[in-house]
Amino acid sequence: MDDLVIGIDLGTTNSCVSVYTKGRTRILENERGGKVTASFIYFQPQGGIVFGEHAKTISVHKPENGVYEVKRLVGRKFDDTYIQKTLDYFPFVISSGVSNVPIISFKQNDRKIEKTPQELCTIILQGLKKYAEEKLNRRVNKVVITVPAYFNVTQREVTLAAAKDAGFTVFKLLNEPTAAALAYYFENDITENHISLVYDLGGGTYDVAVLQKKFDTIEVLCVGGGTQLGGHDLDNCILDYILEVLRKDYRHKAKTDADDKRRLRIKCEEAKKELSSATEAVITINGMIPKHPRIIITLTRDRFEEKASKLFKKTVDILDNCLVNSKISKQSIQEIILCGGSTRIPKIQEMISEYFGGKQLNKFVNPDECVAEGAALQAAMLSTRNG
Ligand SMILES: Nc1ncnc2c1ncn2[C@@H]1O[C@H](COP(=O)(O)OP(=O)(O)OP(=O)(O)O)[C@@H](O)[C@H]1O
Ligand SMILES: [Mg+2]
């Protein structure tokens, strides 16, 4: 038991922790019993740091002290186009620090506090470590952490350094699609040379990879993806639509302030999730426009699909490029594994299946848990080898 190594899926929106024991993987739940935990940090104005679901809830008190999507900032320079584009989008303040590293700042007890993405990443990993230790009732300091396949050397180095500062010895940084494939291979009897495609659409990023089973390893045949393509961008599509309705139908001319936008975006995400099972969702807006104290907007699934169609298509184009550039035929793909919360969207499932000529998609892998499970499996393999 001394060599217990956990697996962490360190996500942009949500993180998940798993461990392999007694011949199976087990998800280690957070303090609320949730299997995934928001990668969210709240710096309390009076001092103290809150992590996870609770942080997300209480950040409404002072949104500029709530930090999220840290993974999108890791290993980037302040003048990186992505960071420059998102400066207005985040409620927290980002500026340039030593060596052009982005610095996130906020106030606690009227004092200015500054954190680098690496330090924020450490806080998230410390929070997850605490959950794992509470669940397992023992110290845990060995880990396999998953990272997107497209992460460059700097992004990987920053993740490793953050984990070290959180008190972890990192056995391996495992690519997310490889982890998902490992979880799938574990549950299924897979023959040699089996080729699978992992389509991972999370909150912040999109990853696609084609993988082939070779003896006891997994060979990556091709990877593609986008760092600004995920559930948050879909929320923004709905937000833009709602703001357009407010302008046209309610003559809302004033610039919507950041706090109203943040509140609206939360409602847009809720509506988006609802539309994965219902054909209509209702968005209620209270007290934003004085003349119309209560506004009710019905969003149909068709309208959502129309507004998000460009983003949906982009994911399929990236997938297509990935296959074409690597000269991999559609027919050679034996299994399509969906992971990431956004793959619950029916239109996305329909488009991928259509792209592969109506092929059935694998629905047996849990889209929220498979990456962490793969990390736990890799962790178990490495701890046996090292032990
Ligand atoms: N039922 C649903 N329908 C549509 N979208 C959903 C549903 N459930 C969750 N999502 C979306 O999934 C996204 C979160 O997915 P996930 O937890 O896989 O992301 P992540 O792993 O943190 O991100 P990344 O892999 O990009 O680092 C959010 O944008 C959320 O709104
Ligand atoms: Mg993910």
Image (spheres, grey):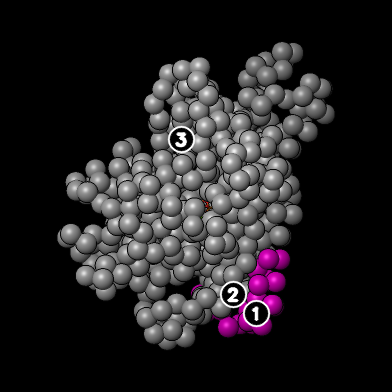
- Above or below, 384 against 331 in this view is above
Residue 220 position within the rendered picture, expressed as x and y whole percent measured from the top left: 52, 76
| Of the image marks 2 and 1, the number of the one nearer the N terminus | 2
Q: Is residue 31 visible?
A: yes
Assess disc 3: are there few (<14), some (14-19) or many (≥20) residues with their C-alpha within 10 Å of its C-alpha.
Answer: many
Kind of residue at badge 3: Ile
- Mark 3 lies within 8 Å of ligand 1 (Cβ measured): no
Mark 2 is surrounded, within 10 Å at the Cα level, by few (under 14), some (14 to 19) or many (20 or more) other residues, namely some
The boundaries of the magenta stretch are: 317-335
Q: Nearer the viewer, mark 3 or mark 1?
A: 3
Q: Which residue is mark 3?
A: 41
Instruction: Identify residue for label 2.
Output: 222
Q: Are marks 3 and 1 in contact (CB under 8 Å)?
A: no
Residue ID at (63%, 54%): 227
Say which mark, if any, is on residue 181. none
Q: Are marks 2 and 1 in contact (CB under 8 Å)?
A: yes
